[in-house]
Amino acid sequence: MGTLFKIAARNVLRNKRRTAITGIVMMFGIGLYIYADSILKGMDRMTIDNMVRYTESFLKVRTPEYVDNLQGNPLDHGIPDPEGVIRKILAADPAVKAAAPRTRFVARLSNYEDEIPVLATAVDPVRDREVFRLPDAVVEGSWLDAAGPRDIVIGADLARELGVGLGDYLLVSASTVYENVNADEYRVAGLLATPDPGLNKSALFMAWADADALLGLDGLVTEIAVAGGSYPSLNALLDGSDRAAESLGRALPSLRIDPIRYLARDYLAMREMKGKFSSVIILIVLAIAGVGIVNTILMAVYARIREIGVLRAYGMTAKEIKRLFTLEGLIVGAVGSLAGVLLGIGIVALTATYGLSFESIVGDVDMGGIPIMDRLYGEWNFGNMAFGFLFGMFVSFISARIPAKRASKMQVTDALRFV
Amino acid sequence: MAILHLEKIRKVYRKGENEVVALHAVDLDIEKGEYLAVVGPSGSGKTTLLNILGCLDVPTSGRVVYEGRELRALGEKELSIYRKEHVSFIFQSYNLIPVLTVAENVELPLVIERKRNGQEARSKAKELLAAVGLSGMENRYPRELSGGQEQRVAIARALVKDPIVVLADEPTANLDSHTAEEIVELMKRINAERKTTFIFSTHDRLVMDHARRIVTLRDGAITGDERR
Ligand SMILES: Nc1ncnc2c1ncn2[C@@H]1O[C@H](COP(=O)(O)OP(=O)(O)O)[C@@H](O)[C@H]1O
Ligand SMILES: [Mg+2]
């Protein structure tokens, strides 16, 4: 084995160009795979992070009846004793950093000419900013905690559609708790431009006191949004949210606790499809690398037919000959795979640290005219790097065996006669 | 008793419809310790004969008897022992492994045999390199040697496992006449010192003149067998 390895390794070194070409194909294949995977995971991360920051939060506490009737945004099925529940939430799990009560309701927003249905949320302006990043997304004006009574914050696209700006007045009408319609006038105090176009087009935020006056909420809280800590990876975030939801579930058995994995389930299901896409990349590139290895080893076999004859004449078995050439393929594969992983690590390190500007990836996509400030950061995924390496080795092994087998089947006398 | 006994050896190569009779009705006895040249023009069957003697090829018909035992009757394991331990080969174009050093090339048969540890193999290789006059060249690579030196390494490689028979197919054909003589003389000296049986083929008169017995082949048949 030692000598076989010596012969194989030295032959690989000797045929530098051949080794380099195959190795480089493998390197780019595996590097590209790791990079694509990292970017896709980074996009996932960004999307989920945005959901956590702007729309869904780390996990949500609601009543089971409310979730069953979610579509209608009903104003019953509120959480009993919300302040008591919030205290329990904050004490139940160390992963929980903050909690904010919210009540969602459907409203119509009018500039006295046009009327647009919006999804309104009554918030506690101070506690809400501990859970959501909405204040950071206010591009004009200010968030509700700095605003006065009868101020609202709405999506910037919504404001544009209604032709209003900061300080303008809008009429908000909605069904009250008593199921009659009430309406009142509010001043636009802030405009939101978030990464979520849905919010920008149809969201309205109103402080608790105003919503109470408009709808007669009388302390009704339909959901409590909970903030978690920061997590190094998407999977850690999802798992952390699951665990926190579990311990909250024990502390609050009559309520329904939905972790972000559930809240973002539609997106996560779509993500599976993208995962398949990056698998296709690695398959195609490594198929090319595999052909390269078959070719490299086949050339090595033909260049050394007489050597094979000599080894056989001196008693080496067909099996050992096969092992010799398989080993050569594996060495080329190992070099290429390792280089690919290193290349992948390098690019991922760059994109994970500095990020990519989002426009460079999605191009000049119309995001409702709102500049997306986010940079896309690559995600580290060591499992996938190991997979890339092992898959490269596997492809090399399979590819090298084809020509290696041919070498081992050669007749000794024919091999020796070969010129 | 002859160490190798050939009886009515016939070898036919088939190439599609064509049949080439490489050897027909070859009878030959070779004694232990002989220094024998197989001579004849190109295509006369020399290589075929040596391959059959070395068990690299099997005759179409006839018997090869080695030390009283018919090779055809030997099991796979005994055949492999015969190949690994009893016979060695020297080739026209040396056929050293280019990526191995001179010493590693000489050790190779022992490594393949797996009978000796690395240190024993190394010292045995050193001893044989000294015997062929290449002391100090252990760490060179074949490409750094002249043809004559390469063939000496090949001779050392053939002798490292202390074989009973060395089969050399035109060992001097790629060498100039002066170097060719040096090589046959070297083989002859080793034959005298170690009693190793040498069977080599050649069509070079100068080279065959060193042999103690000359077997002449023509069109696959023995036409002369001269001892001196
Ligand atoms: N593998 C083979 N297939 C077909 N014919 C062969 C083969 N090997 C040798 N021969 C033929 O057998 C004859 C003897 O060849 P060979 O033993 O190589 O002679 P020599 O070594 O004396 O030149 C030649 O006619 C050659 O063409
Ligand atoms: Mg020949």
Image (spheres, coloured by chain):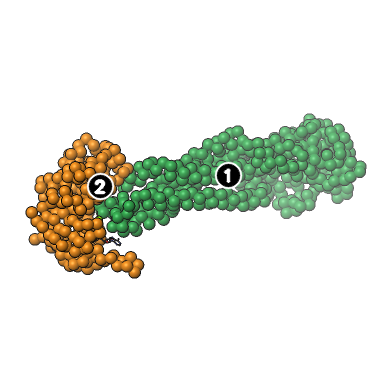
Chain colours: A green, B orange
The chain letter under disc 2 is: B
User: Which mark is on residue B174?
Assistant: 2
Q: Which residue is mark 1?
A: A36
> Mark 1 CB in 8 Å range of ligand 1?
no
Q: Dot 2: what SS?
A: loop
Can residue A328 be seen here? The reply is yes
Task: Report which quarter residue B54 is drawn in.
Answer: bottom left
**Residue occupying the point 52% across, 45% down:** A29
Give the side of residue B62 with respect to residue A228, left or right: left
Give the side of residue A43 with respect to residue A414, left or right: right
Looking at the picture, tell me which residue is in the foreground, A162 or A117.
A162
Looking at the picture, tell me which residue is in the foreground, A102 or A398.
A398
The chain letter under disc 1 is: A
Residue type at numbered disc 2: Asn
Q: Dot 1: what SS?
A: helix
Q: Position of residue B85 (x, y in %)?
A: 19, 53
Can residue A211 be seen here? The reply is no
